[in-house]
Image (cartoon, rainbow, N blue to C red):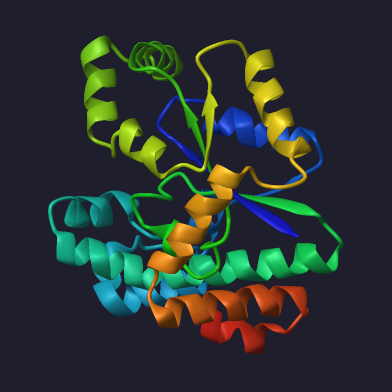
């Protein structure tokens, strides 16, 4: 089973790409949806956050007070890292379970949609070391216009939102497959169709992935191989725990 990692910048069309993959019958794992689900009352992420931050960051109905927690971590890198330690392993675990399920179901391809793939270094997680990175990109002017239209922003608001995120150029440098979404939806779809028709990865993409794997620590490389082997051999969840929550 092939696994593709999908990311992009704000208003570049990543969601449109994910929607097209779904339209083609491909299972798309949405990390944002998982991240919201794991902090619902009683879930593991919710328990981790309560233990780490205390009940002050939860509403009376026990739901997470996202605004209050967001204000805390906005200017406090240590608290941001604590939040990540509470949630990221749980997200990776859910993704691994989903990948295993769809391998068992016989899927030949699964797409994992991670908006902050490069920011969180998720592409270096053992589960994904060998997975090609697709970045959906646009030029700056197109990105601004689409964001202003989508969010009803003026130009300054759109500029500030884009500037608050990791630059698209940085994401492009990390990409294995670059999708240019400056044109029509039909042009976007034709590029995605070309990706789906690939029987083998282009040599440049294969070299990029190999360099990423070789650049990882020995332990991560071993765990990455174990994670891949575990998926292929249908190992149960208990055998996957060493490969999840890195």
Where in the figure is residue 205, as x and y percent of width and height? 55, 46
Please tell me which residue lies in front, 214 or 177: 214
Picture quadrant of residue 82: bottom left
Image position of 227 with respect to 72: above or below: below
Please tell me which residue lies in front, 120 or 51: 120
User: Which residue occupies 35% across, 15% down?
Assistant: 144
The N terminus - image quarter: bottom right
Image position of 156 with respect to 16: above or below: above
User: Which residue occupies 16% across, 66% down?
Assistant: 78
Left or right of 235: which side holds 204?
left
The C terminus - image quarter: bottom left
How many numbered circles does the render carry? 0
Please tell me which residue lies in front, 183 or 207: 207
Where in the figure is residue 226, as x and y percent of width and height? 60, 81
User: Which residue occupies 50% across, 49% down?
Assistant: 114
Picture quadrant of residue 151: top left
Where in the figure is residue 87, as x and y percent of width and height? 41, 67
Please tell me which residue lies in front, 219 or 166: 219
Q: Does any portion of residue 62 appear in the rendered image? A: no
User: Which residue occupies 36% across, 72% down?
Assistant: 86
């Amino acid at each position: 089973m092939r696994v593709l990692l999908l990311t992009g910048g704000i208003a570049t069309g990543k969601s449109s790409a994910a929607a097209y993959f779904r339209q083609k019958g491909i299972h798309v794992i949405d990390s944002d949806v998982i991240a919201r689900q794991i902090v619902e009352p009683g879930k593991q992420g919710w328990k981790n956050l309560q233990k780490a931050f205390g009940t002050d960051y939860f509403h009376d109905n026990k739901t997470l007070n996202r605004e209050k927690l967001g204000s805390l971590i906005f200017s406090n890198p240590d608290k941001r890292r604590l939040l990540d330690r509470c949630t990221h392993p749980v997200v990776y675990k859910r993704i691994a379970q989903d990948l295993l399920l769809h391998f068992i179901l016989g899927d030949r391809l699964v797409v994992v949609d991670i908006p902050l793939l490069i920011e969180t270094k998720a592409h270096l997680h053992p589960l994904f070391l060998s997975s090609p990175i697709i970045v959906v990109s646009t030029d700056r002017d197109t990105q601004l216009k689409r964001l202003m239209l989508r969010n009803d922003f003026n130009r300054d608001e759109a500029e500030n939102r884009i500037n608050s995120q990791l630059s698209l150029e940085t994401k492009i440098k990390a990409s294995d497959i670059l999708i240019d979404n400056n044109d029509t939806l039909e042009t976007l779809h034709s590029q995605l169709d070309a990706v789906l028709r690939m029987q083998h990865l282009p040599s440049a993409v294969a070299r990029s992935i190999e360099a990423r794997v070789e650049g990882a620590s020995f332990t991560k490389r071993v765990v990455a191989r174990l994670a891949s082997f575990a998926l292929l051999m249908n190992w149960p969840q208990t055998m996957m725990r060493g490969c999840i929550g890195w």
